[in-house]
Image (cartoon, rainbow, N blue to C red):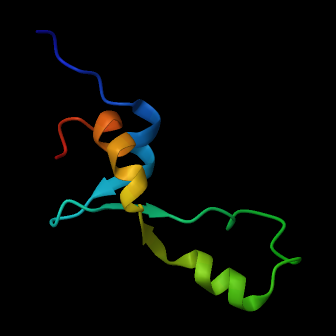
Amino acid sequence: MPKMKTHSGAKKRFKVTGTKKVKFKKPGQRHLLTGDSGNQNRASRKSSIVSKTDMKIMKKYLPYEF
Protein backbone atom coordinates (compact mmCIF):
# COMPACT_ATOMS: atom_id res chain seq x y z
CA MET A 1 0.00 0.00 0.00
CA PRO A 2 1.57 3.35 -0.99
CA LYS A 3 1.85 6.27 1.35
CA MET A 4 -1.00 8.75 1.42
CA LYS A 5 -0.17 12.32 0.48
CA THR A 6 -0.87 15.17 2.90
CA HIS A 7 -2.86 18.03 1.37
CA SER A 8 -0.23 20.75 0.93
CA GLY A 9 -2.73 23.59 1.38
CA ALA A 10 -4.08 22.07 4.58
CA LYS A 11 -0.69 21.52 6.18
CA LYS A 12 0.05 25.24 5.81
CA ARG A 13 -3.27 26.36 7.32
CA PHE A 14 -4.13 23.86 10.05
CA LYS A 15 -2.39 22.53 13.16
CA VAL A 16 -3.43 19.52 15.22
CA THR A 17 -3.48 20.13 18.98
CA GLY A 18 -2.46 17.66 21.66
CA THR A 19 -6.07 16.56 22.13
CA LYS A 20 -6.38 15.86 18.36
CA LYS A 21 -8.47 18.93 17.61
CA VAL A 22 -7.68 20.96 14.49
CA LYS A 23 -6.85 24.63 15.00
CA PHE A 24 -6.88 27.32 12.31
CA LYS A 25 -6.64 31.09 12.01
CA LYS A 26 -9.79 32.94 11.07
CA PRO A 27 -9.71 34.78 7.73
CA GLY A 28 -10.18 38.48 7.13
CA GLN A 29 -7.20 40.18 8.81
CA ARG A 30 -5.12 41.25 5.79
CA HIS A 31 -6.78 44.24 4.12
CA LEU A 32 -10.09 46.14 3.78
CA LEU A 33 -10.49 46.17 7.56
CA THR A 34 -12.11 49.61 7.78
CA GLY A 35 -15.57 48.27 6.90
CA ASP A 36 -15.66 45.84 9.79
CA SER A 37 -16.59 46.75 13.32
CA GLY A 38 -14.00 46.59 16.07
CA ASN A 39 -15.73 43.57 17.54
CA GLN A 40 -15.37 41.68 14.25
CA ASN A 41 -11.69 42.59 13.99
CA ARG A 42 -10.91 41.49 17.52
CA ALA A 43 -12.83 38.22 17.11
CA SER A 44 -10.99 37.33 13.90
CA ARG A 45 -7.59 37.71 15.61
CA LYS A 46 -8.14 34.58 17.67
CA SER A 47 -7.64 31.10 16.28
CA SER A 48 -10.55 28.69 16.19
CA ILE A 49 -11.24 24.94 16.25
CA VAL A 50 -12.64 23.03 13.27
CA SER A 51 -16.20 21.78 13.81
CA LYS A 52 -16.97 18.11 14.33
CA THR A 53 -18.68 17.87 10.95
CA ASP A 54 -15.50 18.94 9.15
CA MET A 55 -13.21 16.60 11.09
CA LYS A 56 -13.81 13.76 8.60
CA ILE A 57 -12.40 15.95 5.83
CA MET A 58 -9.48 17.04 8.01
CA LYS A 59 -8.53 13.42 8.73
CA LYS A 60 -8.37 12.84 4.98
CA TYR A 61 -6.27 15.98 4.36
CA LEU A 62 -3.84 15.35 7.25
CA PRO A 63 -3.60 11.54 7.42
CA TYR A 64 -0.42 11.30 9.55
CA GLU A 65 -1.38 13.87 12.18
CA PHE A 66 -4.05 11.77 13.91
**Going by the image, does 42 lie left or right of 15?**
right
Residue 42 % position (x, y): 63, 86
Q: Identify the residue at the far right of this view.
A: 35
Above/below status of 66 relative to 49 = above
Q: Nearer the viewer, residue 15 or 21?
A: 21
**Going by the image, does 9 lie left or right of 15?**
right
Q: Identify the residue at the far left of this view.
A: 1
Which residue is located at x 42 percent, y 44 percent?
12
Residue 34 % position (x, y): 87, 78
Above/below status of 44 relative to 28 = below
| Residue 61 falls in image quadrant | top left
Q: Identify the residue at the far top of this view.
A: 1
Which residue is located at x 84 percent, y 66 percent?
32
Q: Nearer the viewer, residue 23 or 56?
A: 56
Quadrant location of the N terminus?
A: top left
Which residue is located at x 28 percent, y 41 percent?
59
Residue 18 % position (x, y): 15, 65
Q: How many marks?
A: 0
Which residue is located at x 31 percent, y 34 percent?
60
Residue 20 % position (x, y): 19, 59
**Going by the image, does 40 lie left or right of 10?**
right
| Residue 16 falls in image quadrant | bottom left
Above/below status of 8 relative to 51 = above
Q: Identify the residue at the far front of this view.
A: 53
Q: Nearer the viewer, residue 22 or 55?
A: 55
